[in-house]
Image (cartoon, rainbow, N blue to C red):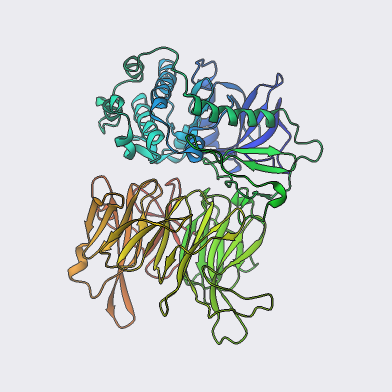
Amino acid sequence: MFPLHPHDPPAIGPYRLRARLGEDAYARVYLGASGDGSPVAVKVVRPEYATDPTFRAAFAHQVEAARGLSGEHVCAVRDADLRGAVPWVAVGRPLGPTLAELLRAHGPLPVDAVRPLALALAQALADLHGAGLAHGSLWPDGVLVAGHGAALADPGLEWAVSDTERRAPHPAFAAPEGGASPATDVFSWAATLCYAVSGVAGPEGLSAVPLQLRGLVDACLKRDPRLRPSSSDLVSMLGGPTEPPPWSPPLRAAIDAVATRQGEVLATDPTRRGANPPETGRRKRGGLPALGAGALVLVVLAAGGAVFAHDRLFGGAADVPAQEDAAEPLISEGRCLDATGFPPPEEPPAPDTNVFDLAFSGDGDVLGVASAAGLMVWDWREGREIARPVTSGSGLLSKAAFSPVGCTLVAAAPVEYEGREDPVHLAHTYDLLSGETVRHLGPQEGPDEQERWLADPDDVKGFAFSPDGTRLAISLDRGHEDGPGTNVIDTATGESGDPITEGLQYETGFVDEDHVVTNDYGTVRVWDAETGEEVGRVEGTSDSSLAVRPGTTQVAYADDPEIRVEDYTDGTEVASFTREEYETDDEPILTQLLFDPAGERLYATWMASTGPGAWRYHPYVWDLESGENLLEAAGEAAPYRSVAVHPDGEVIAALTNDGTPPILLDPDTFERTGTLY
């Protein structure tokens, strides 16, 4: 939940707007108040869809089909304007967090919450299916958790996007056969339950489902839709139709706390007393950043700013310092397409500009491009550069990374210091909304006020944000000496923690918000981000590469001639893959290893010499479930040397083998669908 933007309207139709709830697949969503003060979610169609006649027709059909639908566990359509220049719809909105917000704030649900959630959602689907409707887009961000139980946030209006774009709005939770039907809804119901108890997107979390429900959930995940039970069957098997059991006291307290804060926002008129904050909101010390579309944290809006909830269901509340102790955070709140902090130059980049790395923003709306022309940010859908935080790529490390929340980029840029012949490559964060640049030294002593070095400086080797954006790890190139290798920065304050490793770490990442993982070209180690204690390791890596499977304790690494995926907590091998050309290539080098955001695919690329100064790239995309190389099935329709995967799986951005501008690929067929510029 965000404060209203200065350009947001104070009302839509008869509904007074109180705050932004974020965005879904097609609309900007606001928390609004009806005439009697009851809460609604007002969904205003985004411009790119408002001008699309195909979407408008599909959206109008979805809304009209859902009118009059009643049910305790489905938020009903209250009102809509389908003929205006910008269509909107108002949907009932019980106060409380989404299921995704609840898990991000507190971790997976306790076992005693699974059956109430399962029964409420099953009854919601049964109501929809009984009315001849299918939801088509069930996922954790579309589930509201209120004091009285759980409900679907709307009757499935996001499916209008699929009618237009021929893709599921949320692929990680979609049935393999595609489409929208009662059977696909049952699959998504099961995938959402798996996520609720494991924190792992999609059906991968089945093993965490309580035994008494695991067989039922497993049946709903069958690839053949004919083998899945119906939603009415689910209700019967769960003991319904009936009112679901109440939440446990700790869970109910967490839900009620959010509902109370939302109620306070609902009762406050943000247009009075100067309560509407500036365009770029800033996070306060000790708090979580607000997540992007479909992944918003729980915020308390107050007249003077924002205070963030960060308590655990089964632990004490975090210490939140008083506002006067707050320091400037590194990440601002807002939508990346609204970024104005670093305007782009008038001249576009040359088509043959050398590009080093690509990175999608957390909301998926923009693409960061590290290049010889500088650090560029593009609205990839429109092919329009919106920001250039660094205007020269000279000396940039061939890597950039977006914060998973907000719109902050981190990259390494050269810094000149007196008495040094060569510049020092230091990490810099560039907040696209505020225009603020902050330099980060990593775990080394830096310059004093006169920019004089207190110690011989090292270049920054790598960096990574934690999954929730609250931490930033910085690693140094300690190849020539011993010394602290990695430290962690609190993004809410910009303060650096004590070093947690020694020596050179070739790759740095996060397993979760509390654990850093590094690879020293021999051993993958997992560290407690707060204490620096080593809590796990994987021995025998033959390469410096490293990838963490999102939402798990699994890491991928090279063990020639294979890529292995291993759970570091118990040493279990989850999967292994062998590259076919390994024996024939001349000293192949693994240049990229990463999981897609859903944790369903593993991307790897090798380059092999074909002569002096000449290279050939071999990309692979392995399906973690089947072990299939998906590029082989696609016939390598669009060969590339590295990729960035959209956070919702909407598209793949890739760098080609021939040095042309970045291209866009279909995530299913890998066919080229466009060029960035």
Residue 154 visible in the displayed image: no
Quarter assignment of residue 38: top right
Q: Seen from this angle, which residue lies furthest right? A: 273
On the picture, is 576 further left or further right than 52? Answer: left
User: Against 194, is 388 above or below?
Assistant: below
Residue at figure coordinates x 57%, y 27% from the top left: 256
Quadrant containing the N terminus in the rendered view: top right
Residue at figure coordinates x 23%, y 75% from the top left: 586
Residue 525 visible in the displayed image: yes
Residue at figure coordinates x 42%, y 76% from the top left: 482
Q: Which residue is nearer to you in this view: 476 or 368?
A: 476
Quarter assignment of residue 555: bottom left
Q: Seen from this angle, which residue lies furthest left? A: 583
Q: Which residue is nearer to you in this view: 258 or 594?
A: 258
Q: Position of residue 415 (x, y in %)?
A: 59, 76
On the picture, is 326 further left or further right than 392? Answer: right
On the picture, is 671 further left or further right than 422? Answer: left
Q: Position of residue 84 (x, y in %)?
A: 66, 31
Q: Position of residue 373 (x, y in %)?
A: 55, 72
The image shows a total of numbered marks equal to 0
User: Against 290, is 61 above or below?
Assistant: above
User: Against 386, is 175 above or below?
Assistant: above
User: Against 540, is 32 above or below?
Assistant: above
On the picture, is 241 further left or further right than 285? Answer: left
Q: Position of residue 245 (x, y in %)?
A: 44, 17
